[in-house]
Image (cartoon, helix red, strand yellow):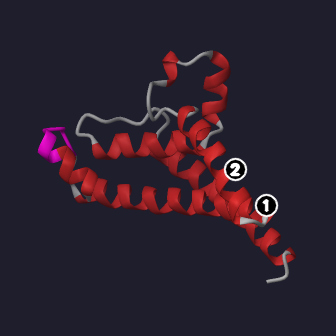
Amino acid sequence: MIVYLLALLLGVGIALNPFSIVGVAAAIVLGSALFATLSLIIACIVKTRERFMGIGQVLTMPIFFASNAIYPLSLMPDWLRVVSHINPLTYEVDILRALMLTQGASDYGLALDFGILAAATAVLVAIAAHMYRRMGY
């Protein structure tokens, strides 16, 4: 909601139709689940808060920079474009740009974006559930 309010105050063309808002909410929930599950997997591996925080910080920036959040994929070197295509954040950003901006369009199609996020989340949930069970909790 804060992003919507700030965008409106700054005069950014924001799509306020119900379909877009529901799609944005769904994408945020799905992306949050994906990255929360990734955090759980990291926590299961390292087992201490200090290591978890350190590794989390080390992973956050590369995931962010290896997505289309800052600059378009067309400007990336070929090797980084390949990394970006396997980065779930790329698809999250693609959904949000397509649904939030009045002139926004998805590079991959919303169905593919949501499908990749859902599949990646399902895989990570399965891995996290297996790892968490093995920890004996």
Q: Position of residue 97 (x, y in %)?
A: 36, 40
Q: Where does label 2 land, which residue?
A: 55
Question: Does residue 89 lie above or below 66 as drawn?
Answer: below
Q: Amino acid at mark 1?
A: Val
Which residue bears the numbered disc 1?
46
In the image: residue 85, left or right of residue 126: left
Task: Identify the secondary structure beneath mark 2.
Answer: helix
Q: Position of residue 22 (x, y in %)?
A: 33, 61
- Write down the region rendered in magenta: 8-14
Quadrant in which the C terminus is drawn: bottom right
- Name the residue located 65 percent from the left edge and 38 percent from the top edge: 86
Closer to the camera in the image, 42 or 99: 42
Q: Is residue 133 visible?
A: yes
Is 72 on the left or on the right of 66, as rendered?
left
Asked which quadrant contains residue 34, the reply is bottom right
**Residue 95 falls left or right of residue 62:** left
Q: Amino acid at mark 2?
A: Ile
Which secondary structure, mark 1? helix
